[in-house]
Amino acid sequence: MKKTMIFGLATALLAISSCSTVPLTGRSRLSLVDDSQLQQQAAIGYAQLLSDPQTKVVSSSNANAAMVKRVGQKIATAVTQYMNQNGYGDQIANYKWEYNLIDSKEINAWCMPGGKIAVYTGILPVTKDEAGLATVMGHEVAHAIAQHSAERASQMTVAQGVGTAVGVASANSKYAQYINTAYGIGGQLAILSYGRNQELEADKMGLAFMAMAGYNPNNAIGFWQRMAQASSGSQKPPAFLSTHPSDQSRIAQIQKALPEAMKYYKGK
């Protein structure tokens, strides 16, 4: 019993002393795992994914692929400016942004630590236009900027024990395994598992990021309504919605966050 109490106290103290702040929202996050290490493994995993013969990367000469790169660059530029101007520049100093469209029926998109982005063609009928795509990409970039992957990995280390935390935080092989599993490297579908609060935080941050990039965040409502329709009547939701809050809850939270996001919108 005494050992259990000591272990629990040590774990709690380690968690308390290993926190950082999420940009834009100011939330305190658990940071036992170094995001820069995840960025290194993400770069390797992303390159492996793109070089895999089973991965059908759409040529940049394609209009939709060009749109993905255009929207991605606008968001990356806006986010970089915001981070540098608000004291978070060191967190993205090693970001090497990449944006690729992958030919797949899967309704999905993601952004790895370090700015490695993939959008699947299956989600384009739902995004419909640049504003819809900006909603998706802003949301996924928000996950990376909030370091949700590192936070999830940190939570795993706490669950496994303090001793394991040291091993995970120092072994690149563990990072590689985490990245490969989370983002589906090696022919498997991505199984990202962010928490509900992380998803809602990414929604809020994503609205601000798309606004900073020149896209009216009010367009996010229409996208999420279309996503709700895309998932209705199916036994299994699209991968993009597999771990997300309910449609009603998400849209209500987005409507609540719109006034703040509009402060960053300088468009027409």
Image (tube, rainbow, N blue to C red):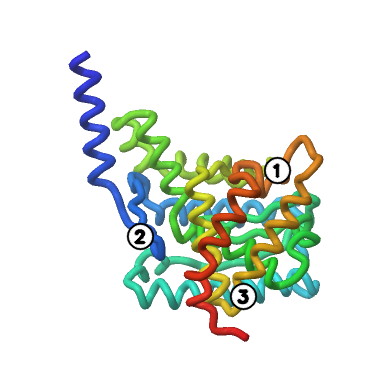
How many marks on residues? 3
Q: Residue at x 31, y 37 (%)?
A: 166
Type of the residue with mark 1: Gly
Image location (x, y in percent) of residue 253: 54, 55
Q: Residues within 10 Å of mark 1 (few under 14, many from 20)?
A: few
Give the mark toward the camera: 1 or 2: 2
For label 2, the residue is 26
Q: Nearer the viewer, residue 36 or 13?
A: 13
Q: Nearer the viewer, mark 3 or mark 1?
A: 3
Viewed as shown, does residue 49 lie left or right of 38? right
Q: Quick one: quadrant of the N terminus? A: top left
Horizontal arrangement in the rendering, residue 17 relative to residue 193 (left or right): left
Q: Which residue corresponds to the image point at 26% horizontal and 33% vertical from the top-left? A: 11
**Which numbered marker is on residue 146?**
none
* Disc assigned to residue 187: 1
Can residue 214 be spotted in the picture? yes
Q: Residue reaching furthest bottom? A: 268
Q: Is residue 209 left or right of residue 34?
A: right
- Name the quadrant containing residue 126: bottom right
Q: Amino acid at mark 2?
A: Gly
Q: Of 215 and 124, which appears nearest the observer?
A: 215
Q: Considering the numbered disc 3 on the image, is that residue within a helix, a strand or a loop?
A: loop
**How dense is the environment of label 3, judged by Cα within 10 Å: few (below 14), some, or many (20 and up)?**
many
Q: Are marks 2 and 3 in contact (CB under 8 Å)?
A: no
* Disc on the earlier residue, 2 or 3: 2
- Which residue type carries mark 3? Asn
**Disc 3 to disc 1, C-alpha distance:** 36 Å
Which disc, if any, is residue 216?
3
